[in-house]
Image: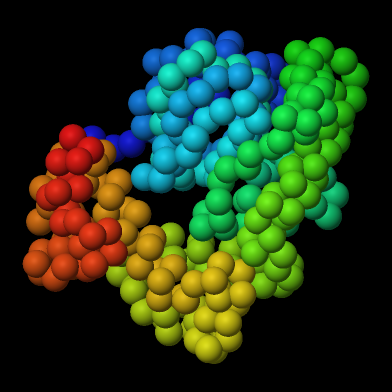
Amino acid sequence: MNNIPILNIQQFENLEPLEEFYSNSLDKHLDKNKDLVYKPHKHDFYLCIFFTQGTGIHEIDFYSYEVKPGSIFFLKPGQTHSWKFTSKPNGYIFFHTQSFYELNSSNHLLNQFPFYYSQKNTPSLYLKESEITELTIKFNELNSEYYSNLVYQQIKINSLINSIYIDLARHYIILKPKEGRSSLRYLETLRKLENEIDTNYLKEKSANYYAKKLNISSKHLNRIVKSTLDKTTSELISERILLEAKRMIVHTNNSLNTISELLGYEDYAYFSRIFKSKTKITPLAFKKKYS
């Protein structure tokens, strides 16, 4: 079985004592890590990429997003992505662990930002040309600070990350208002729900199970999911199973029958019907499409 590689920060350049943070210009990063980053892969950290030049396609968990100047992408740990460029890209990239940000940002959590609080929220943002210059200055300052080795470096880096995230969250909320405004209490419940689903979806596919795990009624849980993501709890569970099915079909050598069993469906015909109802094609057709 071929598994999707999971990259960690230690595989990239790091400067002590910032082993949980990394920054670079995008052209240097892609050139230096070309053997790692062009094939489909995952990360165990949070990642933000800003394009000032270049065109192409960024595929994230089987959704394709356009790459162009002013495009920004946010990835959470565990998401699978890959690149296909049609012209030379440039810009900036930085990534960090959850602990690096939250331990050094008093009372600030990553999931307060709309682009990180759920994997169901759009992972892309497209800025207007007039907005690119101001953000370029901030990304450049962050990158320069990373390589400076000056005193108070970590404090300055966290301050710059926070400033960038706040600016991007404001743009995000304006462009995607439905994905940007939810109460912190609802967001915390959603985060716990997604974590529970990630842990248990292979065995537990009932919305009632997750409501009990979170000690709330299934009706209230459904209200929270509907308010934050405009989906039902059952849809959220189904989408997580479907995503894993796609990953296994494309990125492993398992047979379709084996994949069905690994996902908790002993009857392949039943699994195939569910898959087709959600994707409009059979698992076999999906495999051929990506082979």
Residue at the spot 80% in from the left edge and 42% down from the top edge: 167
Residue at the spot 33% in from the left edge and 61% down from the top edge: 241
Picture mark count: 0
Please state which of residues 286 and 107 is positioned toward the viewer in this rendering.
286
Residue at the spot 41% in from the left edge and 71% down from the top edge: 235
Please state which of residues 5 and 220 is positioned toward the viewer in this rendering.
220
Residue 71 lies in what quarter of the image? Answer: top right
Relative height, residue 222 to residue 145 (above, below): below
Decide if residue 239 is on the left or right side of residue 227.
left
Decide if residue 112 is on the left or right side of residue 50.
right
Residue at the spot 46% in from the left edge and 26% down from the top edge: 56
The location of residue 121, given as percent across then percent down, is: 56, 56
The location of residue 88, given as percent across then percent down, is: 51, 13
Relative height, residue 73 to residue 177 (above, below): above
Decide if residue 248 is on the left or right side of residue 283.
right
Residue 1 lies in what quarter of the image? Answer: top left
Please state which of residues 157 and 285 is positioned toward the viewer in this rendering.
285
Instruction: Farthest residue to the right: give it.
Output: 151
Relative height, residue 126 to residue 205 (above, below): above
The location of residue 135, given as percent across then percent down, is: 78, 30
Residue 213 is at least partly visible in this image: yes
Relative height, residue 66 to residue 17 (above, below): below
Decide if residue 119 is on the left or right side of residue 83.
right
| Colouring convention used in this rendered image of the protein | rainbow
Residue 266 is at least partly visible in this image: no
The location of residue 283, given as percent across then percent down, is: 17, 54
Please state which of residues 181 and 97 is positioned toward the viewer in this rendering.
181
Residue 290 lies in what quarter of the image? Answer: top left
Q: Quadrant of the C terminus?
A: top left
